[in-house]
Amino acid sequence: MSKAKINIIFATVVLGMLMAALDQTIVSAALPSIVADLGSAGHMAWVVTAYLLAEAVATVLAGKLGDLFGRKLLFQVSGLIFIVGSALAGLAPGMGVLIVARGIQGIGAGGLMVTSMALIADTIPLRERGKYQGALGAVFGITTVVGPTLGGLFTDHASWRWCFYVNVPLAILMIAMAARTLPKLRSVARPVIDYLGIGLVALGVSALILGLEFGGNEYPWGSWQIIGLFVLAVLLLIAFVRVENRAVAPMLPMRLFGSRVFTVSSVLSFIVGFAMLGSMTYLPAYLQYVDGATATVSGVRTLPLVVGLFITSIFSGQVVGRTGHYRYFPIVGMAVLALGLALMSTMGRQTSIWLESLYMLILGAGLGLSMQVLTIVVQNTVPYADLGTATSGVTFFRTLGSAFGTAVFGTLYSNRSEPALTEALRQAPGVTPEVAVNPRLLRELPIEQAAPIIDAYASSIGYVFRWVIPVALVGFVVAWFLPQVRLRDSARHGADDIGEGFSLPDSDDRVVQLERAVAATVRKARAAKPIIPELIRASGSTLGPDAAWALGQVYLYDKQGQRATVHAIAFRHRLPVEVLAPVFRHAVDGGLLRDDAGALSLTEQGTVEIDVLRQGWRRWLGDRLDDWNYEDPADRALLDEALSTIAGKLLEQGADAEPVKV
């Protein structure tokens, strides 16, 4: 494909990723206004939790369904589901409908995110893929954290409903672009889908979150309903473990937990997701109710958390990439996270804006130090056969942590705020409950009337942060069990990718994951010096770069079943025929190409040279990925086969490079 078409495809994929990632956090600044309009403050957390939980399940299914039905179709269907969920959320007459709509949105978002990564692998040449993957990861990271500001803008200047309506035209545009630009590709092998395992874990986690959400709100903690939900969750999760031990292609192989690295990284990913999404969901509410900020300003005021997260995430990624040492980052990160939560639990009506910003900066710094290395270190230690499932497993735990964090934050907040507000209203005669839950109306009250209500909100959110400190301390203890292992060069090359830091939902296909590692390696190598001369030396070929390029061009045309001519090749690369003709004439004179009335084809000697170049790519990859050796011969054979296939792809895609770049 031409560079222009690749960029159009990338823009389509970015649009899907943009919407899916943005809707994780866009509603946080709008939640107080949603509660003021729809009521049911006790169910506020479910507006976020329903989305995250549905997204977690959808990301597990999307990769397999994309292989089954084709990624283009799944991308478009996911977009359609997202449109339905967005429209229904915007029209929601009550909290129950909104929560259901957010669940529908989450299903579409999970499909969009995972399919976006797979489409990059399908359409972007390996030699170019590294920079596109990095850009997509940056989009995911940035949209995840600027969502509150955009949600505040819509809430203040239109309505909270526009946080959802805006997705509809964008998703329609995305589907139309996908129809025209995305190639129709489908996996040759029919995938085995672990429907039972996915269903059991989804139901088990849902029952557990419902128990946490309803406990102390809808029903007393000791009621049969809450105990029944917890018992049901335990039974379903036990059944999930049993099913995974027997499944042909389990979504989460239990053998992975035999690795201390995977177990510790999964726990830490869960805690990072727990703290990040939980705090980002409730901070805007604090700023609106306690500081009197508008929805827009509350989103902007969370930026110190984002700044802290980005600075330490990028810093830790750079250090890990250069040194390979990562172990102390999660340890320090969890300690700083606990400190940030402790400081934020002290905030109140008298706390200055600058001090609040400092506390948020510290909280964000702890998150950034903790989250960067977890996926990388897991990819570095599991066998190649488990590379895809281990990567998606760590991401799955982070998304689950986000759902649990939002639910637990919501439960703690509701359990504390309801009695606190009831007492505050007694001290503020003439203030109705409707005014107390509406931040705009609360700002209009005289300070004498508003003070007890503001203090009730401050103490409630401070109470939430105080109770989350033990979670961070558990993470601090667990982080000490993360062993330091030697990072592969390919892992270090990807350490400074922002998407790695934010645990971007990714494909569970091990080939896609290996190709990502190769793409990062090629990107670093190309930045250092030209690859083609080095490749020729690695292959032992006596060809010059010009002859190698000429052979590659004819080989590429043969592979595509097209007639190779100098005029066609010159037209393809927008170069004068006079520039290229001597190169091909020299190859013909050297017995590498056959010229049949202008139609070029490989001679037997030329075919041999192409095979030599392919082996050169394989040897070049082997030299840079030799730290992928494993003790298991079967796993090593699987890796060798995949690398040989990738070497063939690099040869074909390298043949399509511009001659000046060769």
Image (cartoon, helix red, strand yellow):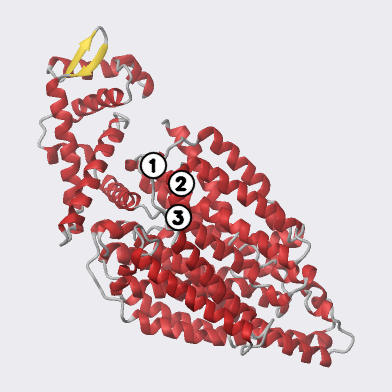
| Amino acid at the residue labelled 1 | Ser
Gap in angstroms between the C-alphas marked 2 and 3: 20 Å
Where 257 sits versus 660, above or below?
A: below
Quadrant in the rendering for residue 375: bottom left
- Residue, disc 2: 66
**Which of marks 1 and 2 precedes in the sequence?**
2
- How crowded pointer 3 is (Cα within 10 Å; few <14, some 14-19, many 20+) is rated as many
Labels 2 & 1 near each other (Cβ < 8 A):
yes
Query: Does residue 163 sit above or below 284 in this rendering?
Result: above
Q: Are marks 2 and 3 in contact (CB under 8 Å)?
A: no
Q: Nearer the viewer, residue 458 or 576?
A: 458
Q: Nearer the viewer, residue 181 or 154?
A: 181
Q: In front of the other: label 2 or label 3?
A: 2
Sequence-first tag of 2 and 3: 2
Say what secondary structure mark 2 lies in. helix
Residue placed under numbered mark 1 in the picture? 187
**Residue 442 left/right relative to 257:** right
Q: Amino acid at mark 2?
A: Gly
- Residue 559 percent coordinates (x, y): 29, 26
Q: Are marks 3 and 1 in contact (CB under 8 Å)?
A: no
Mark 3 → mark 1, Cα distance in angstroms: 24 Å
* Numbered badge on residue 353: none
Q: Which residue is mark 3?
A: 137
Q: Position of residue 274 (x, y in %)?
A: 51, 74
For mark 1, does the 10 Å Cα neighbourhood hold few (<14), some (14 to 19), or many (20 or more) residues? few
The N terminus, quarter of image: top left
* Residue at point 73%, 89% (across, down): 419
